[in-house]
Image (cartoon, coloured by chain):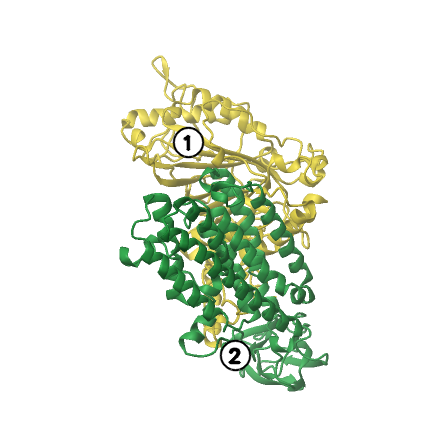
Chain colours: A green, B yellow
Amino acid sequence: MNAPSTHRRAVACAATALAAGLLLTACGGHKDGSGGSGGAGTKAGDASDRKSTVAISITDKDCAPSPATVPAGSVKFDVTNKDSAKVTEAELMDGGKMLGEKENLTPGLSGDFTLTLDAGTYEVYCPGADTSKTKFTVTGAAKKTWKDDPQLVAATRQYGAWITGEVKELVTTTDAFTAAVKAGKTDEAKTLYGKARIHYERIEPTAEIWGDLDGRIDGRADDAPTPADFTGFHRIEQALWQQKSLTGTAQLADRLDTDVKSLYAKVKTVEYQPAEIANGATDLVNEIQTSKITGEEERYSHIDLLDFDGNLAGADEAVRVLLPALKAKDPALAATVTERYRQTAAALKKYVATPGYENTGYVDYSKVTADQRRTLSQTVDAYAEAVSKIAGKIA
Amino acid sequence: MNDTPAADSGPTPAEPSAAARPAVSRRRLLGAVGAGAAVAGAAIGAGGVLAARDHGSSDDAGHGAPAGSASDTAATVAFRGGHQAGIATPAQDRLCFATFDVSPTASRADLAELLTSWTEAAEAMTLGRPVPGDVGDLNTPPDDTGEAVGLTPGRLTVTVGYGPGLFDDRFGLAARRPSALKPLPQLPGENLDPANTGGDLCVQACADDPQVAFHAVRNLRRLGFGTVVPRWMELGFGRTSSTSPQQATPRNLMGFKDGTRNIDATDASLMGAHVWIGEEEPQRWARGGSYLVSRKIRMRLEQWDRDRLGDQQDVFGRFKSTGAPLTGKAETDTPDFAAKDGSSYVIPADSHIRLAAHENNNGLRILRRGYSYTDGIDPQTGDLLGGLFFVAFMKSPDRFVTLQRVLGAHDALNEYIQHIGSGVFAVPPGLAAGQDWGRQLFG
């Protein structure tokens, strides 16, 4: 798929909130109130350390829990089928979602399952019984959110500051690039192009919150409804490397300058949520896969390896700010993500060159063979798969 | 933990190795569907059980395994047992076959862990359940990719095999290499593409629904990120072999019945003599397993279709219409290789069935379980790309080598086919209760 840049998905939740004219932080992003979504044994710490035991007796008639109300915390459900041939399982449901169950309980059998539950109203469900659903209540304080976790609050601040710093650099380097373009200094412009591009590639998921702006800055020829709508970095890239003429690009340069400055003004107002940061990291690694490995993004200049570097650095920053919280919740995943980042960085490092193609520090991507691209892709794939699991652990 | 087959306690058929277990409808994906739908799902499941039971009782041979009609697709095939499913169990209609290489960065522990998770996932999928783990967390990608939800298990079998490369020095497995496992030698007439050849591991997923088979391979691949990388994958349709007398002999893309004389996989003594690795194998862990040889065989279909019928029949040694040998009347008639018409054999000297026949190969037999494939259109010629994805199981890969040396050199069919891909794998025995592929391999 030639994923056109403007169709890429920004942090979807943030974009929705923006469209509704809300502050980004107004967007919940997590099914608060559903509680216990991590399944048995996980999510410890979301609720108190209280432990309760609830007996559920399956009969043809129903599967009423006893007691029907417990405090938030760890809840063990002891399920017994006394004599029902037609009802053989009990499930704890939260709305339409099953949180846990015990099944295959033929008459005389019993079993248990344990969940960590937040305050809320649930149902015990036993398919086949005369009354198949019975209400079950968990009392206590409302579920804690990420804002109650100092590590996550620190992570969002740290990430926000890093993004703002990167966009500030983007403004400065774009300014230098566009000045060279307007002065008609082709060689200098080619060198400065990469210096600006890398900052954009690091922060792309944030920039994509503003789809129009992202399209004007980073859109490709095939994204533009008409040729006149093709603007920004890649339009000038085309002029420099393919058309080999800067005629008529002064206006494009000015427009690009204005757009990145506008982006800078906007990113300073953004507040991030941990899940968005994590999902943004996944998006960045997916970006490497869909538009760098393929050579799609920098199709005229072939500086794709520099963009790869930028995407990877952006993903790594997002992961690193979340890592303390992730280590506390899922040390194995934290170790896997760290190791696969190391492998991906090592795979990319094989193509480092000094000063490199167009002074990018990397070789010309058009010289990287199909087999080499495949190896790079497989390494990136493994990293992306691990990164995609972070949001569910920390949110 | 996720899901219950509503019919787990249903009747079990007489033939356990080819168990047509009671129907299990792929139920709701956890809580994604409300209670009403769940009840409806259970009702459908129950109907499936009855259908399977009816079928079984009308099967006088006592083989509970259905022959693959649409109404049978709810049945499941037992995942565990003395041998892996997908070899002696009746051939399903569809195949998804993939091979994988272990990543250079993966360790012995990574590989063992992957094989354990593959076992768990494969067993769940053969029961028509999703890959375990999902709790419907909105912030997490679902553990199962989802495309098989609502489909029946389709008699899914997932069979794994290990290539010669796995037993090199990377994972400390050299001392556990099944003794006959080594790369195949170069064989006459082959033109192998590395992109369709080899692999450290293979997964054969067979089902009556192609989406169920694809889903199985896709999800195992997904679990493999960081440990294995896919090497090649093939989709097969229209099984080209019957593996029991209850199955009609299908036709290959050349329009011929091919596989009439295949080993009857329900015959335990034949399977023991020709297919299963037995006491002769010093590696005890591999006994009860087999060897899988895959060959991607392109057919020159346009050229074949222009060949006159008489010649087509001479190439195979069979009548195209009935499938009977040229010396017989009915498909299952034993070919008379001595019969002559004047000075030449009725079944020509270079015909396929003569060269492949066990009578002419010192009794040598293999169990074929292949499928037709197509890769679309050859961009160079505009001709169809397709043929036979040959899969066979045998006691030792030497048997295939012996046969193919004869066929590759002399078979009249060679004018119309070419072997373009290849694989050889040791297939471990079936898993006992509580066992998994990782512990089985590493001991």
- Amino acid carrying label 1: it is Asp
Q: In front: B249, or B199?
A: B199
Disc marking residue B284 = none
- B364 left or right of A138 in image: left
Secondary-structure class at tag 1: loop
- The image quarter containing residue B396 is top right
Q: Quadrant of the C terminus of chain A?
A: bottom right
Q: Position of residue B207 (x, y in %)?
A: 47, 50
- B5 left or right of B210 in image: right
The outermost residue toward the front is A183
Is residue A372 shown to the viewer in this render?
Answer: yes
Q: Position of residue A218 (x, y in %)?
A: 40, 57
Q: Mark 1 and mark 2 in contact (Cβ < 8 Å)? A: no
Label tally: 2
Q: In front: B386, or A377?
A: A377
Residue beneath the point at 50% across and 42% down: A374
The chain under label 2 reads A
Q: Residues within 10 Å of mark 2 (few under 14, many from 20)?
A: some
The chain under label 1 reads B
Compared to residue B265, the image places residue B312 above or below, namely above
Q: Position of residue A270 (x, y in %)?
A: 50, 72
- Amino acid carrying label 2: it is Gly
Q: Position of residue A142 (x, y in %)?
A: 61, 84
Q: In front: A151, or A244?
A: A244
- A248 left or right of B391 in image: left
* Residue position for label 2: A95
Q: Residues within 10 Å of mark 1 (few under 14, many from 20)?
A: some
Disc marking residue B333 = 1
Secondary-structure class at tag 2: loop
